[in-house]
Amino acid sequence: MPVYASLLRSVNVGGRSIAMARLREVYESLGFARVESCVQSGNVVFTTRLRRAEAIASMIESAIAEEFGLDVTVLVRTPEELDRIVSANPFLPGADRKALHVTFLAGTPVAHAVKAADTERFAPDRFAVKRRDIYLACPGGYGRTKLNNAYFERLFGTAATTRNWNTVEKLHAMTRAR
């Protein structure tokens, strides 16, 4: 059965709280199996017979809206996509792993927008776009950078959510352990 990792945007920040135990129950109510959450920021790994990531994300969004009354964007990645993300980080080796993050995009940005993006504008913070994912190196910390979800959503016109490198590696390992 296919394995997926889902990432919820803006959960358990700014008063938008969802208990991970209850979230797992919601996933199970959708017929997903082997449901496991990763940290408190809305990361869930699960299996399902469904094969369309967009349809899966839409189902989860609807269930969260119904159960919790929250409008939450859900992004879904496969183990293969996480393999590519982990193996293609342009800042490794060399960068401090604590400074690394990945911003996951709901859609693929158009080529001209990627080409026009000024990757050095916020130096020493840097970013690199690869398909639907943006690699970040933020030596001063993600909390201080201007390279946040809102910036990339405006720049590329699609929803975004960011995870630190440690969480990305954990999600990758969880999808591969199934």
Image: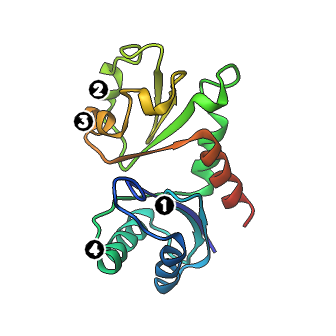
Of the image marks 1 and 3, the number of the one nearer the N terminus: 1
Three-letter amino acid code at disc 1? Answer: Gly
SS class, disc 3: helix
Assess disc 4: are there few (<14), some (14-19) or many (≥20) residues with their C-alpha within 10 Å of its C-alpha: few
SS class, disc 4: loop
Q: Which residue is mark 2?
A: 112
Residue at 64 percent of width and 43 percent of height = 166
Distance (Cα) linking label 2 and label 3: 14 Å
In the rendered view of the protein, which quadrant contains the C terminus? bottom right
Q: Which residue is mark 1?
A: 42
Pick the residue in front: 103 or 88: 103
Of circles 2 and 1, the one toward us is 1
Of the image marks 3 and 4, the number of the one nearer the N terminus: 4
Tag 2 and tag 3, C-beta contact below 8 Å: no
Coordinates of residue 156 in the picture (x, y in percent): 29, 36
* Rendered image: mark on residue 154: 3
Assess disc 1: are there few (<14), some (14-19) or many (≥20) residues with their C-alpha within 10 Å of its C-alpha: many
Q: Which residue is mark 4?
A: 69
SS class, disc 2: helix
Of the image marks 1 and 4, the number of the one nearer the N terminus: 1
Three-letter amino acid code at disc 4? Answer: Gly
Pick the residue in front: 116 or 38: 38
Assess disc 3: are there few (<14), some (14-19) or many (≥20) residues with their C-alpha within 10 Å of its C-alpha: few
In the rendered view of the protein, which quadrant contains the N terminus? bottom right
Q: Is residue 151 above or below residue 73?
A: above
Tag 1 and tag 3, C-beta contact below 8 Å: no
Coordinates of residue 25 in the picture (x, y in percent): 51, 81
Q: Is residue 124 left or right of residue 78?
A: left
